[in-house]
Image (cartoon, rainbow, N blue to C red):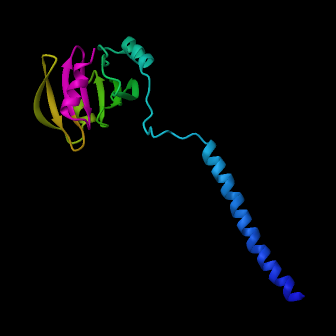
Amino acid sequence: MASDAKAKRGRQTVRDMVLSLLAVGAVAAVVYVFIPHSGGEPVRTVSYGTELATARRAAPYPVLAPQGLPAQWRATSVRYSADDGGHATWHLGFITPSGRYAAVEQSDDSAGSVVRAQVQGARPDGTAPVAGRPWARYQGTRYRALVVDGKGGTTAVTGTATYQELARLAQSLR
């Protein structure tokens, strides 16, 4: 009888462990089903209308933003601030239709300073005509840029995007 009780206790322990695992698995499945998922969209998009209006009132240069870009160009970051040197800076970042990064960077600092700040290891790479104006091309270790001096400021369109995508973004700036 004593060995009968021992054998029964061993089976109960295994049975109880299996039941416990099933209960934990059921709870985990319910949690997984009811917790919201990102739906495969790893990039958070932003609206930049308010920041653009604020920057246009505050900046000492005409702040530019794209108009007429297809919906596949998704805005991902926006800010207007003063940089370490006290220069007014405008940043508007995008994911391009090809999944690369492109950004509009404007500042009342010199073109050389903007390029050094935005394109690590930048080297001149010729020019590109954009909207009837020559923009300087720069190739860096990771980013490339199209840069032009304007009324009171420098505009750079930069990122991992191709020069063609950068030119498309530059053409849309108003």
In the image, farthest residue toward the top: 57
Q: Residue 116 versus residue 71: which sits nearer the camera?
A: 71
Asked which quadrant contains residue 95, the reply is top left
Which stretch did the figure color magenta?
145-174
Asked which quadrant contains residue 65, the reply is top left
In the rendered image, residue 134 lying in the magenta stretch gets the answer: no
**In the rendered image, the vertical position of residue 49 relative to residue 127, given as above or below:** above
- Residue at 85% in and 88% down: 3
For the question of whether residue 110 can be seen, the reply is: no
Residue 78 shown left or right of residue 169 in the figure: right
**Quarter placement of the N terminus:** bottom right
**In the rendered image, the vertical position of residue 127 relative to residue 64, given as above or below:** below
**In the rendered image, the vertical position of residue 52 relative to residue 85, given as above or below:** above
Residue 14 position in % (x across, y down): 73, 73
**Quarter placement of the C terminus:** top left
In the rendered image, residue 149 lying in the magenta stretch gets the answer: yes
Residue 119 position in % (x across, y down): 24, 37
Q: Residue 30 versus residue 157: which sits nearer the camera?
A: 30
- Residue at 18% in and 32% down: 163
Asked which quadrant contains residue 52, the reply is top left
